[in-house]
Amino acid sequence: MEKIITPVKGTREFYPYEMAVRNWIYQNIRYVSELFGYAEYDGPFLESIDLYAAKSGEELVKEQSFVFPDRGGNLITLRPELTPSLARMVAQRQRQLIYPLRWWSFGPFWRYEKPQKGRTREFFQWNIDLIGTHTPEADAELIAIAAEFLKQIDLTPEKVKIFVNDRQLMDLKLSEIGIDSSLLKNALKIIDRRDKMRSDSWKEFALELGLTEEQFSELSKILANKELYKESPNLVKVFSTLENMGIKEYVEYDPMIVRGLDYYTGIVFEARDVGKRSRAILGGGRYDNLVNDLGGDPLTGIGFAMGDVVLPIILDEYKLLPAMIINPAIILVTIFDAETTSTSVSTASELRKAGIPVQLFPEAAKLGKQFKFADRNGIRYAVVIGPDEIKEGIVQVKDMQTREQVTVKSKDLISYFKGLLAV
């Protein structure tokens, strides 16, 4: 027996159940996105690495991107995120678009990370952005969309919270303790790693990146101050707007939320599992310079992204994943014997023409075997057409859940099933 070739490390295989989960997530994403009036779009799966080199940060470009030369020698990457593509797309047609833009997308992305639970190298991601307005109400709207999605899939505030901060506030507080622009990027990296490291290792990491003992002590006080948001008029207004929107219970201030990407300039936020403080379910923030940096005129934006890997794990832990419909067929048309095959084939075809999902058993076999097949595949009804039924112009319909069997006239079969499905 030849050795089975295994999939590429970190990629994913979507068997019917996993595909059903992915589609369920997508359906909820679409519902919530459209509820707030956002239009669906997408960008290229392949991009020039130069698109990310300027603004996304060195770690994403040098360590996490799948980069390869094309035949012309240009460095190409499988897209690791979508916001730079979005900014470029907007810059290309900036004077033709109507603002503010409300766009969303759901598609595949790739990052060269160490595969582990909740992290793969290939993932699907929801991206949603509001471009062309810079108000606290706009910031609140994106946070509200995230909260509405969590509510839609029954993740209550007791299970998941959205933690919010303001990068402008953090820049100000860091400058007050002597952290200038040359050290700012390292300081944000230090903050971003706080809940991923032990206290002693985190301090050592901070000192290695250039903080003094005094700066580290002052930084620790800043990160412990849960009332710091009151010094940011923007944050105060965002929280009051969220209260008016009826979802303030989902939101909490957290000075440790800074987000790792370089292009964030204002409000930043992440949704996390409250109980286990797992990796972020979703995260995003305001970016005011990205469109300008990619060749367009200055244009502000705010958005967030959510991958499809962590979310099902959390939903499964809380037993919130609904039963998935794997098989779309609700009827199995059986084949009694060779002589009746043509009638079974035509019956299945007529049902499909009426818009009813049907499977036809592929060969004549004992009815018990065909019923077992229907049972194991979650097919609700089995239609039996034997020689006697053909002679009398009837069919037998068996309900695989209740085990009840009824006789239906062949000419009434479509209306019979439409009546059942309408209930």
Image: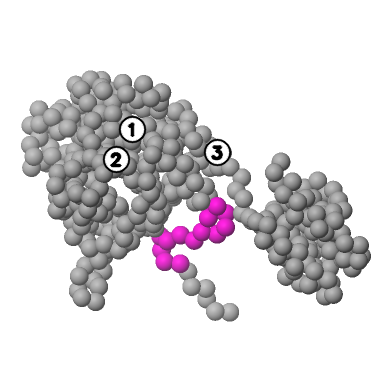
Mark 2 → mark 1, Cα distance in angstroms: 9 Å
Task: Point out the frontmost of discs 2 and 3.
Answer: 2
Q: Earlier in the sequence, mark 2 or mark 1?
A: 2
Residue located at (18% from left, 29% from top): 169
Q: Which residue is mark 2?
A: 130
Q: Which residue is mark 3?
A: 320
Q: Secondary structure at mark 3?
A: loop
Which x, y percent locates residue 262? 19, 45
Residue located at (43% from left, 37% from top): 35
Task: Point out the frontmost of discs 1 and 3.
Answer: 1
The vertical placement of 312 against 162, above or below, is: below
- What's under tag 2, amino acid-wise? Leu
Could you tell me if the residues under marks 2 and 3 are in contact, i.e. CB atoms within 8 Å? Answer: no
Confirm whether the magenta stretch covers residue 207: no
Give the number of the disc on residue 331: none
Give the number of the disc on residue 141: 1
The vertical placement of 97 against 16, above or below, is: above
Is residue 75 visible in the rendered image? The answer is yes
Q: Seen in the image, is 299 located left or right of residue 340? A: left
Residue located at (71% from left, 41% from top): 423
Which x, y percent locates residue 226? 27, 23
